[in-house]
Image: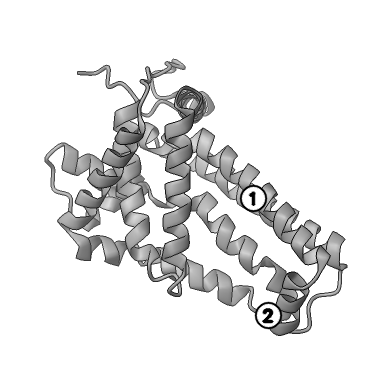
Amino acid sequence: MTTFHVMAGSDDMAARPAIRRITLSDVRDALALGFEDFRAKPSHYVFLSLIYPICGVVLVTWSSGANLLPLIFPLIAGFALLGPFFALGLYEISRRRELGMDASWRHALDVRHSPALPSILAVGALLFALFVAWLVFAQLLYTNLFGPEPPQSLALFMASIFSSENGLLLMLAGNAIGFCFALIVLATTVIAFPLMLDRDVGAVVAMETSLRATLMNPMPIAAWGLIVAALLIVGTIPLFVGLAVTMPILGHATWHLYRKIVVDERK
């Protein structure tokens, strides 16, 4: 029964939430509402979201040895695959503000009391598996093009990437593979975590609803994906510090995007 709860939700029924069509203006509005949530108590949110630049720096530091130099970019790019899971506390803050409840940063940890926690962890585990798979693909691609020997230095590594045909092929193929992974995550989790947090519908139903929402709203969801990618890139440029601002805004905006897409049939 626990397994079925994770799959279908607490009511033991694989109910399919109704979704609506949205426009690009709805995406802009969700982003604006996300910024308003962030602006309400920015010091709290910046403190909470320091985990993002810290994790980013740790990832780069961990991979800074010559043996792992080829994985620096895949690690940075793949970090975005885990973003929907790491933003759970931000969804909770937006949910509480929407209900007029106390929304101080400590309530971000209230997610651990959610009845949907098993489902949330199940989808989170799937994202982590995709993250690992992306790193494996990236490593295999580099090995096939440049051989098993690790680069001797950062300078030689950069030179081999930007001044050779194999380097160009690595960038083109790597970005193409990364795009496929990002598309899978976007299509299946764009609103999955807010939905599970709000209704405890189960992992499968949440991901299926995200997929239906993506297929029904291809242009708005694609625009949302581009916005996410652009803001994450901007956030990583100044030593990942910008993620302390861009990640909370995106997290809050995701909650509002969920509200615009999924019909609240409880009202």
Badge 2 marks a residue whose secondary structure is loop
Q: Is residue 207 above or below residue 235?
A: above
Q: Report the disc number at residue 236.
A: none
Badge 1 marks a residue whose secondary structure is helix
Residue 138 falls left or right of residue 34: right
| Pair 2/1: label in front | 1
- Horizontal and vertical percent position of residue 204: 52, 27
For label 2, the residue is 65
- Horizontal and vertical percent position of residue 16: 43, 17
Say which residue appears at 30% left-offset and 47% top-offset.
Answer: 252
Say which residue appears at 74% left-offset and 78% top-offset.
Answer: 159
Instruction: Determine the image quadrant of residue 167.
Output: bottom right
Instruction: Determine the image quadrant of residue 183.
Output: top right
Asked if one can make out residue 50 in the rendered structure from this viewpoint, the answer is yes
Residues tagged 2 and 1 counted as in contact (Cβ below 8 A): no
Say which residue appears at 28% left-offset and 44% top-offset.
Answer: 92
Asked if one can make out residue 84 in the rendered structure from this viewpoint, the answer is no
Q: Is residue 189 above or below residue 69?
A: above
Say which residue appears at 43% left-offset and 52% top-offset.
Answer: 86
- Horizontal and vertical percent position of residue 105: 23, 57
Lower sequence index among marks 2 and 1: 2
Indicate how the structure is coloured in the image: one colour
Q: Give the residue type at disc 1.
A: Gly
Density class for disc 1 (Cα within 10 Å; few <14, some 14-19, many ≥20) is many
Alpha-carbon distance for marks 2 and 1? 23 Å
Q: Is residue 43 above or below residue 254?
A: below
For label 1, the residue is 178
Instruction: Determine the image quadrant of residue 217.
Output: top left
Density class for disc 2 (Cα within 10 Å; few <14, some 14-19, many ≥20) is some
Q: Is residue 170 above or below residue 100?
A: below
Q: Give the residue type at disc 2.
A: Gly
